[in-house]
Image (cartoon, helix red, strand yellow):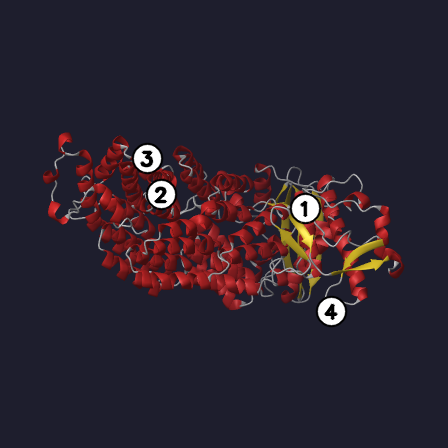
Amino acid sequence: MFDTVWKDSFVEDSTLTRAIAILRKQLEDDPRSPKYIETVPTLGYRFIAPVEIVHRRETPPLDASTSAPSTLLNLSPSEPAAPVAPHDLDSVARPVPPGKDRGRLYATAATVLAMIGIAYGVRFVHSRTLPMSVKDTTIVLADFANTSGDAVFDDTLRQGIIVQLEQSPVLRLLSDRQIRATLRLMGMSPDAPLTAEVSREVCQRVNGGAVLEGSVSRLGNEYVLGLRARSCSTGEVLDAEQIQVARKEDALDALSQIAVRFRTHVGESISSIENLDTSLAEATTPSLEALKAFSQATKVFNASGSGTAIPLFQHAIELDPQFAMAHVWLGRMYADFGEEGRSIESTRKAYELRGRASDRERFSIDASYDLIVSGNLVKARETCEAWTQMYPRDPYPRGFLSGIIYPAFGQYEEALEEGKNMIEIDPDFVVGYRNIALNFIALNRLADAEAILRRAVDRKLFLASFITDSYRIAFLKGDTVGMKRATKAAPTNPWLMNYEASTLARAGHLALAREMSARAVSLARQASRPDTEAQLEIAGAFLEAAYGDPRIARKMALLAHKLSQGRNAEYGAAYVLAITKDSSDASKLTADLAARFPDDTLVQYDYVPTLQALLALNQHQPEKAIELLRTTLPNELSQPLHPIYIRGQAFLAMGHPAEAAVEFEKILGHPGLILNDPLSVLTLLQLGRSYVLLGDKTRARTAYENVLNIWSDADPGIPIRQQARIEYARLCGPEDGYPLHTWPDQRRTDVRPIKQILRFSRTDR
């Protein structure tokens, strides 16, 4: 069809994505439950509405040229639709939407091809010189000069024009993060007012194309809003817009009109503007006060982080409870703190209000909903990839892809690439550096991880999580000095305390680990963060389950579940209960997880099968456990690595030590993923046991010696350590200088032959 209508034309992926988004908007088609256009992952799009065959004699002349070529409209960029032969035009298929009359039908059919034509219009804009010569160049937005005497306009109008211009797929606004960084290079405060002169110098330093100068003033009882574009290099006025309103409440609508005029004058196509332009009141809020609070919140977040921004986002919502973007931002702030319940509540509200947002912001809301509420990572990935196509200069979808989505699928190289794209778009977006560092750590590229964190610090960028990342790097390098330096830098960070507790427990210092874990939980409790408290309680329960008292571990797990029924806390509680043989409670929580999160990718393809496999092992059904874990195979290198460990246990229980060894070596071969988790030592012990059953005494001894070296000064009386020592003594034998009677606590240790121990031991301990 494309070859028939537009000969010698080529459709880019980004152009196609824009066209489909516009089509869906015109048809009022929800991509989550489509009636007309369905996304076929990795292939493209297809038309799914019912169709009927209409012969030419029954169809107005225009219809023959605007009908779809077949019942399946496959718009995959890799598989373009086949051309329509001339004789096929006598009989073509067209959709029959339920409840629509034929007049509406013809209009819809015409709209379909018209909207596809819009894609070519947008592409044409990309290929010609803009009248103002600011195409694909950076635009710096100055503060609005407010001489009206009304403080409500302070920051508000600038935030409004940002929202309006960011709807354009062809304009590039310099982010506030980059502006602050440039101000520092100029020897100025990052919070210095962005006057016209200062903004022009910023623009020159970043090789920008134009400065936008806004203004609001009084003319009698009315207000005059203006927007002027100047060339950064010459100061020449490129465009000037002005509009007069009778009431300040009309200012947002006036600002929308000014933005549309500006987009038109810089050469953006009319079709692009018409289909990617949501009025400011609809895209944000009709309340100037709420928009001002929102603007202040985003400014504080960029400067100081999530904690200080939360009250301001809450205030924006108090002023306008229907403010969709304020809700979704608040959800992200809560997510940063690990407050899953509050994050879900805010994000769900944003999704309910998504009709009050621009097309660009709806991408953000949809992605946040699937990441935080539904957990459907496949849809989140699809949304973010489409987002990057329609708005290639937006760093946020790349942040989601690099920080959450690709790592959840174990795709660390892809995540790393998106992180690099993120800071290439915005070199001062601090989250990008953090995402890159985490992916370098996952790939065990520690020098690269250190280098990217130094690069962020050199740009005067900082996140509290940089300290925990530095701790992880130091641990993997065996740098105890670096680990101590990190803990001293953030002595009250509960998550850093949790990492330190894991390191202590891994070395067998269980008493100190318990103390550190309890302190972390206490800090979360004092801060009234129940979800965080629950997750830290679960972390402590893991330590008890691995090295300590299983009865204490079960109590801690049940307490955590009372604090939070979030997916992560419930999975952690169920896992601890399962490995401590409380199959009854573990089964209940597993069933609850499966029922409450039916669309959650991690729950359905990782958490639930992992728990079911553990329960199968408890019932001495290792073959069933292996089968249950098949669904985890595609993404098994995502964290945590529990499915791999359980698969290894199941192979051992089946008497297949070679297969078990492969699984345990897989974990140990990814130190950047297992990190300081005590599971790493248990994995090493299981690997030694696998080598024993294989008859490989040399490698078995090496594995046991590595385990016992880690536990060389461990607390006395740790059951798993005592068992490992006796197994090693039996492996070596008296002829190697390790007689059984030389080991302490021998009467409390299992002294059966090692193959019998492995056959019947509690391999989860």
Query: Gap in Å between the C-alphas at discs 2 and 3?
Result: 14 Å
Residue 499 percent across, percent down from the top left: 31, 47
Residue 279 appears left or right of 399: right
Residue occupied by mark 4:
99
Disc 2 secondary structure class: helix
Disc 3 secondary structure class: helix
Q: How crowded is mark 2: few (under 14 residues within 10 Å), some or many (20 or more)?
A: many
Residue positioned 70% across, 40% down in the render: 133
Q: Which of marks 3 and 1 is in front?
A: 1
Residue 722 percent across, percent down from the top left: 18, 45
Q: Report whether residue 567 is seen.
A: yes
Nearest the eye: 416 or 168: 416
Query: Gap in Å between the C-alphas at discs 1 and 2?
Result: 39 Å
Q: Which of marks 3 and 1 is nearer the N terminus?
A: 1
Amino acid on which the number 2 mark rests in the picture: Ile
Q: Are marks 1 and 2 in contact (CB under 8 Å)?
A: no
Residue 589 percent across, percent down from the top left: 37, 62
Amino acid on which the number 3 mark rests in the picture: Lys
Q: Do the residues labelled 2 and 3 touch (CB within 8 Å)?
A: no
Query: Gap in Å between the C-alphas at discs 3 and 4?
Result: 66 Å
Query: Gap in Å between the C-alphas at discs 4 and 2?
Result: 56 Å
Task: Say which mark, if any, is on residue 477.
Answer: 3
Residue occupied by mark 1:
76
Residue positioned 60% across, 44% down in the render: 393
Residue 530 appears left or right of 549: right
Query: Gap in Å between the C-alphas at discs 1 and 4?
Result: 29 Å
Q: Which of marks 1 and 2 is nearer the N terminus?
A: 1
Q: Earlier in the sequence, mark 3 or mark 4?
A: 4
Amino acid on which the number 1 mark rests in the picture: Ser
Residue occupied by mark 2:
674
